[in-house]
Image: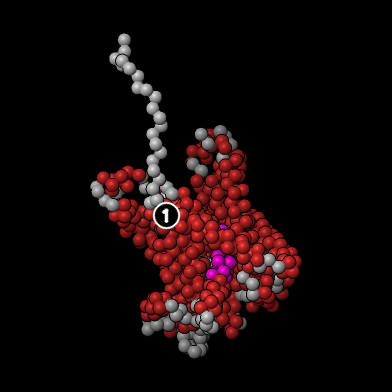
Amino acid sequence: MSAVAELIPPQPAPPEALRRWTKTRVTGAILLSLWIIGGVALVLWLFAAWSPDKVATYAPKYLSGLMTTLTLVGISITLGAVLSVPIAFGRMSSNRLLSSLAYGYVYFFRGTPLIAQLFLIYYGFGGFREELQAIGLWVFFRDAWNCALFAFTLNTAAYQAEILRGAIESVARGQHEGAAALGLTRLQAFYKIILPQAMIVALRPYGNEIILMIKGSAIVAIVTVFDLMGETRRAYSRTFDFQTYIWAAVFYLIIVETLRNVWQWLEHRLTRHLKR
Amino acid sequence: MEPTASLGGQLYTLISLFDPFCGPVGFLNLLPENSLLSCGDTGWGDEVARGFFVTITLALCSLPIGLTIGLFLALAQQSEVRSLRASANIYTTIFRGLPELLTIFMIYFGLQIAVREIALALGFESGFDINSFVAGTIALSLVFSSYASEVLSSAFKAIPAGQYEAGHALGLRPGKTMRLIILPQLVRIALPGLGNLWMILIKDTALISVIGLGDTLRQTGIAAKVTKEAFYFYGIACLLFLALAMASSIVFSKIETRVRRSGVSR
């Protein structure tokens, strides 16, 4: 027997709460419409200012500048990754001299602006011309592109060494002990147990470092390397047309956003086994 | 060129009063008169010192502006209103994605063009040039604010909802809850991240030298060109930036211990 004598008849869904125009909603709408108006105005302006002969002159230059930027960043990130390994191990070494040397290197390159390092190498090494000629390195340091590559490699090696060190040290102590208990040698343990776990931790900082290098590489334009920024500056100095800078901004935003999304996908993909 | 913006100018004068290089107790005065770094007309010590103070002034001017914009951006990113979130995200995507150098050039040339166009529209000839200090401060504040918003909004996420509810239960209005309850905790959580951003800001100030501001890098660059001792003077510039980084890390660790002392130990 039930205590309920009659059932409640089915009711319509409650009316949707009235969404009032609060102050935040008004602000949001105003700000967003400002962005939209700005964006549309920009597109219209670019459309109006579109001139076929300027495009014919400068589009190939922009593309070659883009390639220069990507090549420069690609090579220096790769070389920096190689160089970062001994530095990271030096940082972790129990040898006082080695670890303080590595620490000094990292501190110098992370504590000073990249542009100052580039000037130090490009203009500074020019002062040692005779010495460099004597050991045959002048051919290398004479060229701005090589100097930029050298400076970027040293700089990114310092940052990557810190990423690598942080990632390796983040692997729990028990993992080392587990590997030792299984009878793996230290090298085997490093390659099969420590490194795979460290690389997952390091993935996101590595992505950030690549993006930082792409953005940072714009300064090579100051030392006469015609990367994307250099071509932009050259185009602006010839045309005095502000859209040269707008196009550079569009290119840089596309590269950075693409890279960011690729990295997000990569991270999602590589950490599938960690998701619950 | 010296900073002529009134606030920047005053700050600059205040900082250069405590000149450790060529001031009344400056250590560079100990150098012999004809060395490269001695003060006065014979050496470059005072010029480089002036550039160093411009660097500090520029960073100190951009910091409060960037922090304020960053805080509002973080609040917007927290908001339930979708349009507000979207507009904040557009802002951070743009200024985090653009190279700092490009932002600086765009602000510098863009402002100049804008001022000229507005002046022409109002019907008079403009002989007004945008000060590179002002343009630099604006550009660095924009970049700093978009990074600061990320740090601050992750700090906001670390504060449990119970804190807001407690403020509400005590009868505080939302603004007061924010000021009295949330912000003090926010500072504690966000401080290490903001410290990193400050270091990045100091390094970014070096880029303003390319639009002609006489900061550390430009002044040492001029000295390098005149004396042909490029390695020496750019080395000095690097050392000055290193000294600034070291000093900031000391100050920040002091602030952090101080702020942590007032926190509840959990």
Location of residue B123 with respect to B138 vertically, above or below? below
Which residue is at 51% across, 89% downward?
Answer: B42
- Residue B256, by quadrant, is bottom left
How many numbered callouts? Answer: 1
Query: Relative to residue A22, is residue B169 drawn left or right?
Result: left
Location of residue A26 in the rendering, given as x and y in whole percent from the top left corner: 42, 54
Query: Relative to residue A107, is residue A78 drawn left or right?
Result: right
Identified by mark 1, the residue type is Val
The segment highlighted magenta reads B97-108
Q: Main secondary structure of the magenta part?
A: helix
Query: Relative to residue B65, is residue A259 drawn left or right?
Result: right
Which residue is at 28% across, 48% downward?
Answer: B167
To which chain does the residue with label 1 belong? A
Quadrant occupied by the N terminus of chain A: top left
Location of residue A71 in the rendering, given as x and y in whole percent from the top left corner: 69, 59
User: Which one is in front, A165 or A14?
Assistant: A14
Location of residue A214 in the rendering, given as x and y in whole percent from the top left corner: 61, 60
Residue located beneath label 1 in the image: A26
Which residue is at 50% across, 47% downward?
Answer: A169
Mark 1 surroundings: few (<14), some (14-19) or many (≥20) residues within 10 A? some
- Whether residue A154 appears in magenta in the rendering, the answer is no
